[in-house]
Amino acid sequence: MGKYIPEKIMVAVDFLLFTIEEDQLKVLMVPRKEEPFKGQLALPGVAVKEKETLSHAAKRCLAEETGIQDSVYLEQLYTWGDDCKRDPRGRVISISYMALIPREKIKEKIGKRVTEVSFLEVGQMLSEEKEIAFDHKEILKYARERIRNKTEYTTIAFHFLPEEFTLPRLQKIYEILLGKELFKANFRKSIQEYVVDTGKIQKDGAHRPSKIYRRNEDRFSE
Amino acid sequence: MGKYIPEKIMVAVDFLLFTIEEDQLKVLMVPRKEEPFKGQLALPGVAVKEKETLSHAAKRCLAEETGIQDSVYLEQLYTWGDDCKRDPRGRVISISYMALIPREKIKEKIGKRVTEVSFLEVGQMLSEEKEIAFDHKEILKYARERIRNKTEYTTIAFHFLPEEFTLPRLQKIYEILLGKELFKANFRKSIQEYVVDTGKIQKDGAHRPSKIYRRNEDRFSE
DNA sequence: TTGATTTAGTAGCAAAACTATACTAATATG
DNA sequence: CATATTAGTATAGTTTTGCTACTAAATCAA
């Protein structure tokens, strides 16, 4: 090795911001304003700067698109660089990051901005007919799979909810992510160690009100 | 975006080749011949070329160090680039790949070469005192964790064995990877769907011989 | 030849976890 | 005050897991 001549490879970060809205898993996408793929939807992304960490580039991307600066659940997914032609402008490798956010936070932040960014239903984005820029459909597919898997053996689903929530709501989140219905009694057993009763209750229509829970922080300090 | 000026970021691949030898998990490492970290052990790595895919760079690294060109189990692990100072020579991001190989294949290939590469016990490499070049100890730790996890819910352990094997041997592999002893009867129930009896037997000392199995390929076509 | 030793392989029990159903509880509405 | 609706719980039945105890097939030594 010794001194090296850097190859002309651009390092980018692609960013997937997920939320659950109207009982659907949605992802933030932006219409491209320039060629290539002008007019098509794409994941937000940035070029990584020489003096910038990868996770910083991801957070910068989040802030630029949405104004969100809070600490959110952020996870590196995969690095795409096996198709040398994935970006027609030259060699790019892209590190994909995903973040999960409760829809309540979006309202606060994005509502104030006048942007073209929007949350779109993941299932629709992945449908055959839909055209998506670059290899972003594949990345999106990969991310959704990761969310599904991790929903089964971690507590990432909680990141789609605010501080306080009801168990019926939490169960609904799990059902959306897993794509199937769950048995109430079993579900509650499986998550009971991760929640604590706040003592509050939420009245919500002509029926028995739900108890309000929050995370059991003891169990969330991995 | 439009035209871009590439930042001076070097893209590298770090390669972890694992095997099981003398009932220990071992990884291929090479002593560095130059500064920085001259003399210390490091994972083999290469700079990614402009016209080269990431997985190709990984395979090239494997071939250069060991002469192995066969298809082996290869998996992208993680991309390291949060510490801008990880390589004292400049900004480098490195994509780590791991490969698993049965020790029988090593004998064939590496035995013929006169190199300084060697397989070293992972536990020793990770011990407090041991000094390892760059951030390679962290990468190694991450990889070992990945192997452990995947051993529990996939069949990656099989990649440490040749085509044909006995169940006591397979169990031993699992025990080494998981770091704990398993009950014979339970283990056999859990893997029975993944193996088929070849009809052959292996005599191996003053005791009952073992049946020889091979993978059930139906179950290995993910 | 036969009994001791050693590892391979199997049968089956008890405990735990999981799947599913059926119940009770608390609210609003007419 | 009966009804509708969703929240929450008790529990039965099944499957999986953890473990023990057995039988089987080889070599070796007396």
Image (cartoon, coloured by chain):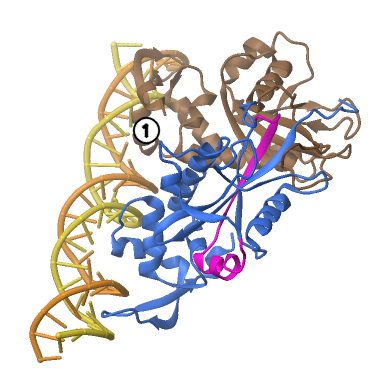
Chain colours: A blue, B brown, C yellow, D orange
Residue at 90%, 27% in the rendered image:
A2
- In depth, the one of B204 and B198 nearer the eye is B198
Where residue B172 appears, as percent x and y from the top left, is 50, 31
Q: Which residues are magenta?
A: A88-114
- x%, y% of residue D21? 30, 41
The residue at which mark 1 appears reads as: B188
> Where is the N terminus of chain A found, in terms of image quarters?
top right
- Whether residue B105 is situated above or below residue A222 in the rendered picture: above
Magenta stretch: includes residue A159: no
| Residue A32 horizontal side relative to residue B152, left or right | right
Q: Residue at x 66, y 27 (%)?
A: B54
Q: Position of residue A199 (x, y in %)?
A: 43, 83
- Looking at numbered disc 1 in the image, what kind of residue is underneath it? Arg
Tell which of B44 and D21 is nearer to you: B44
* Residue A110 on the magenta segment: yes
Q: Could you tell me if residue B103 is visible in this image?
A: yes
Q: Taking A68 as reference, is B207 left or right?
A: left
Quadrant of the rendered image containing residue A85: top right
Q: Is residue C12 above or below residue A66?
A: above
**How many residues crowd around disc 1 within 10 Å: few (fewer than 14), some, or many (20 or more)?**
some
Q: Residue at x 73, y 53 (%)?
A: A56
